Amino acid sequence: MSSVPLIFDAPRRGRPPRHLADLDPSERREIVAALGLPAYRADQLSRHYFARWENDPARMSDIPVAAREALAPALLPPLLTPLRQLETDGGATRKSLWQLHDRTLVESVLMRYPGRVNQRGVNQGGTERRGTDQRGRITVCVSSQAGCGMACPFCATGQGGLQRNLSTAEIVDQVVAAARVAASGALPGGAGRLSHVVFMGMGEPLANYTRVVSALRRLTDPAPAGLGLSQRSITLSTVGLVPAIEKFADEGLGVTLAVSLHAPDDELRDTLVPVNTRWKVAEVLAAADAYAARTGRRYSIEYAMIRDVNDQPWRADRLGKLLSTRLAHVNLIPLNPTPGSQWDASPKAVEREFVRRVQAHGVAVTVRDTRGRDIDGACGQLAGQV
Ligand code: SAH
């Protein structure tokens, strides 16, 4: 009789190995029990991962060695292999290029904002300051897909198409890795706690809906179920997949929604955000309004300022008018040039005039800083290239 090796848990092609962050606590306990270990080991392991950001079994000295050796491959396989780390802003901005189990590449960016306002808060009536103040924040920008299928022509990720969806754990592990770095004291300013997560890396999060929603639960559930981050400290940015926004409003997650508008008119938005040919500006805003009504959370409108493309005064007026009655604020992003693009950022004077005109409609505006631009780690520059 020939002996066939029993490799129950070998990663299947195209599917990342199972990880505890893919599972809820009861599923983890079942797996642990099936390994012949007491079920509470699942919570112990989860606490190491979610509360201490530990993924090295060798440092889990409260778990017997034999148990660790069984638990680690079953629930804590390495998911992200660091291929390259780049830093700028004196180490306060760090981009990581990760290789996944199937050699797919994704990037995440960790940013620490020092104890002063360094995002130009251009406020209306002073009430916006609290919501847009970045003082003391440690934020990680995560990818939800390898590549992206949305094909926005100004975005580096959009140029290569979609490779695949990330698993829940592949998303969560980017956050845990960032929390580990923040806690290690490696960032300027010393050891700190990761405070914010933005889904603004590679991919369209609502196109990987189920896994992204699970990841959001893992990020917000308290340990040992998850990381225990506050819902309001998480921002999900979308091109505007209307049915998905509507569904997302029913998930009971109070995360902040950001909508990549980039143009107030359908004619231009059809070209800048191609999915607009399917769901128009009015429909996207209506879905965001419904989200805001449901969650009580103000949403943000992202608007990349592209020279001579979408930065005209009339478009500022149109945008201001469009948003004046809505629970929304505008986040202008100076365009980050991407390789091969014919587009440029708007001149500062044009940007200032745009801000002024939008504000004249009583709409709050902030201008995003261009953190990480020189390491291709700014908005829209993540491409996962080696
Ligand atoms: N798919 C999501 C997340 C994308 S990245 C979305 O589209 O919202 C987050 C933001 O960066 C989006 O608003 C995106 O349009 C913007 N962005 C993409 N490329 C950019 C670039 N080159 N310069 C400035 N912003 C860019």
Image (cartoon, helix red, strand yellow):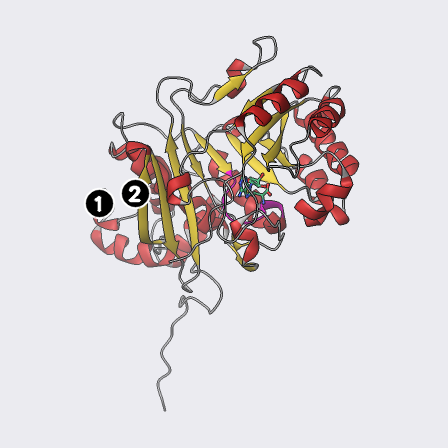
Image-quarter location of ligand 1? top right
Which residue: 26% across, 49% down?
56
- Callout 1 amino acid: Arg
Label 2 beta carbon within 8 A of ligand 1: no
Q: Is residue 201 magenta?
A: yes
Do residues under tags 1 and 2 come within 8 Å of each other at their CB atoms? yes
From which residue to which does the magenta span run?
A: 199-206
Task: Please indicate whether residue 260 sits to the left or right of residue 2 in the image.
Answer: right
* Percent position of residue 339, x then y: 48, 52
Q: Quadrant of the rendered structure where residue 280 is?
A: top right
Q: Is residue 297 magenta?
A: no
Task: Please indicate whether residue 120 sits to the left or right of residue 320 in the image.
Answer: left
| Mark 1 or mark 2: whose residue is earlier in sequence | 2
* Percent position of residue 114, x then y: 35, 22
Kindly report the secondary structure that dominates the magenta region of the rendered protein. loop
The residue at which mark 2 appears reads as: 54
User: How far apart are the two marked residues, 1 and 2, measured between alpha carbons?
Assistant: 8 Å
User: 77 above or below 327?
Assistant: below
Mark 1, Cα crowd under 10 Å, few <14 / some 14-19 / many 20+, is few
Which residue: 20% across, 44% down?
61
* Secondary structure of residue under mark 1: helix
The residue at which mark 1 appears reads as: 59
Mark 2, Cα crowd under 10 Å, few <14 / some 14-19 / many 20+, is many
Q: Quadrant of the rendered structure where residue 46 is?
A: top left
